[in-house]
Amino acid sequence: MDLKVRNRENIDYMVRTIRHKLQLVNGKMLRSDDFSLSKYEPLYDIYTLVQRQKSISTFQIEAILEELKALRDPSSSA
């Protein structure tokens, strides 16, 4: 899988991976449908940041979730 390619499949993969790494219990809190292709690069940056971390503090999780919230498509319903 080449994550440098902008497509829905890669967004789905990155969001699933971020959700798993952040250990989010509520999957609806972070859905791939909430992100448009126009937000691919910032989402990819967050994905790479999360992947580099061996452990993530509660403070970091909150900050990452705030960044993801800012990237969400305004028309998403969550």
Image (cartoon, rainbow, N blue to C red):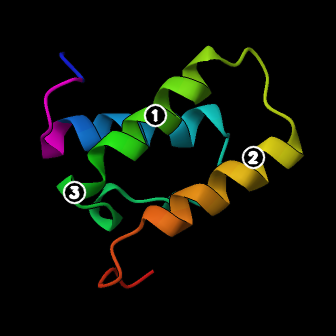
Front tag of 2 and 3: 3
Answer left or right for 33 relative to 50: left
Assess whether mark 1 and mark 2 are in contact (beta carbons under 8 angstroms). no
Q: Is 13 above or below relative to 38?
A: above
Disc on res. 61: 2
Residue plotted at (24% across, 23% down): 3
Q: Secondary structure at mark 3?
A: helix
Disc on res. 45: 1
Given residues 44 and 16, the one toward you in this image is: 44
Q: CA distance from mark 2 to mark 1?
A: 15 Å
The answer to if 37 sits in the magenta stretch is: no
Q: CA distance from mark 2 to mark 3?
A: 23 Å
Location of residue 38 (image quadrant): bottom left
Disc on res. 3: none
Q: Is 4 above or below relative to 17?
A: above
Image quadrant holding the C terminus, namely bottom left
User: What span is colored magenta in the figure?
Assistant: 4-9
Q: Residues within 10 Å of mark 3 (few under 14, many from 20)?
A: few
Q: CA distance from mark 1 to mark 3?
A: 13 Å
Q: What is the chief secondary structure element of the magenta stretch? A: loop
- Give the residue pinned by disc 3: 38
Q: Amino acid at mark 1?
A: Asp
Q: Which mark sits nearer the N-terminus, 1 or 3?
A: 3
Percent coordinates x, y for residue 65 in the rendering: 64, 56
Residue plotted at (66% across, 49% down): 64
Percent coordinates x, y for residue 61 in the rendering: 75, 46
Q: Which mark sits nearer the N-terminus, 2 or 1?
A: 1
Residue 25 in sight = no
Answer left or right for 76 relative to 3: right
Given residues 24 and 3, the one toward you in this image is: 3
Residue 57 in sight = yes
Q: Residues within 10 Å of mark 1 (few under 14, many from 20)?
A: few
